[in-house]
Image (spheres, rainbow, N blue to C red):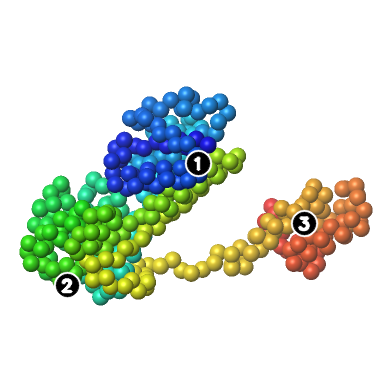
Amino acid sequence: MDVKIYVNPEYKDALWSTLAIKAINAEIMRKRYTPVFIDAPEVSEIDFDHLYEPGEKRLMVYIGAQLAITPAVLARFNDYGVHVVFLNYESQSLVSGHSKILLNYKDGMRKSINYLLSCGRENIALYGINPNSSTDMIKDAFFADYLAFRGGNPSRDIYYNYASQRGCYARFAENCRSYDAVICANDVVALALICHLREEGVRVPEDLFVVSFGSTVLASMANPTITSVSVDHEELGRQAILAYAYLYKNPGDITLTAKVDAKLRIRASTAHMPDRGKDIFASFLPQTPNVNFYDDPITQRVFEAETLLLGCDELDFGILKGILRGETYPHIAEQLFTSENVISYRIKRMCKTTGCTKKAELVALLAPYFKP
């Protein structure tokens, strides 16, 4: 099986994109499929009719940030009947009708904050955020929500990197002593921050815990080694190819969604303190009530009625219409060209399906949905 892959050129050199491609290639090789990378500067220049053989199911893996998935891009895919497995950060309503493998950076932020709070570090800053990065702005929005519930100040506690590491640190240095932990946008920023802190006599982890995103080789070897959040790219590759293969083998209009969560790798920059696994974060944000939609008695009755109707044939439907109109068994039998015994048997069977004990209960179950 050929696996068609398109990498948005604007993101092909991004670290997450490089790792995603590596993981997808590894899974393709493991499955003995054939990767077909599409070389085009943009989706509008892909010759789909040439790319796919006549009768071939039109599937594609698309790697790129959500900002690149514009209505025009989607219209192009839809016009040529291409079902796309999108790899990006967030689910968007505009990609409905296609499949999605989501990189869950919100989960990474949640785990980072939970971990630091469980370590007793409550004065946390978010550092090195690139305003032009889709992933960084997800972290930014999540942290701002957290600060709002904690009474923090986003304009003070979030530090942006406007293409100048020293400029970012200069702003942070003004408030550095008021924090006991920092979450960095990525390992590159974290490594630079630790160097700046060392110059100023601020010790990591004794004075300041540092958590980052990326889990690069350098972060795992530096002094101190850096506690990092990373997306499980092996799982990302596996999910993408599993989705592609399933769609390839199964006809029909199917869409799939998978979410790959983050891993927290604890190292020296947080003193190797263990993750206690407590979701302390839940006490700061509003939680969805733990309710079961199907426990509601009205909902249950709707499903009972639907279960009954799914098992009915034309004769059953005729009988149901008759009893809902209050007609007698002889009249229903005459109208449907059958016997009263058949009518009686069918009604008993339908009562058994729904748990009703008599015809009146069956009528009461269905009547609310068929009233004029």
Residue 286: image tag: none
Q: In this rendered view, identify the residue nearer to me: 55 or 291.
A: 55
Q: Is residue 91 visible?
A: no
Please state the horizontal and vertical placement of residue 303, each as a whole percent of the image. 65, 60
Depicted 36 relative to depicted 288: above or below: above
User: Distance from label 2 to label 3 (Cα)?
Assistant: 77 Å
Q: Helix, strand or loop at disc 3?
A: helix
> Which label sits in the foreground, 1 or 2?
1
Q: Helix, strand or loop at disc 2?
A: loop
Depicted 55 relative to depicted 207: above or below: above
Q: Helix, strand or loop at disc 1?
A: loop
Tags 3 and 1 touching, CB below 8 Å? no
Q: Amino acid at mark 3?
A: Leu
Q: Is residue 112 left or right of residue 317?
A: left
What residue is pinned by disc 2? 206
In terms of image quadrants, where is residue 65? top left
Please state the horizontal and vertical placement of residue 12, each as a whole percent of the image. 31, 39
What residue is pinned by disc 3? 324
Q: Amino acid at mark 2?
A: Glu
Q: Is residue 273 left or right of residue 235?
A: left
What residue is pinned by disc 1? 32
User: Distance from label 1 to label 2 (Cα)?
Assistant: 50 Å
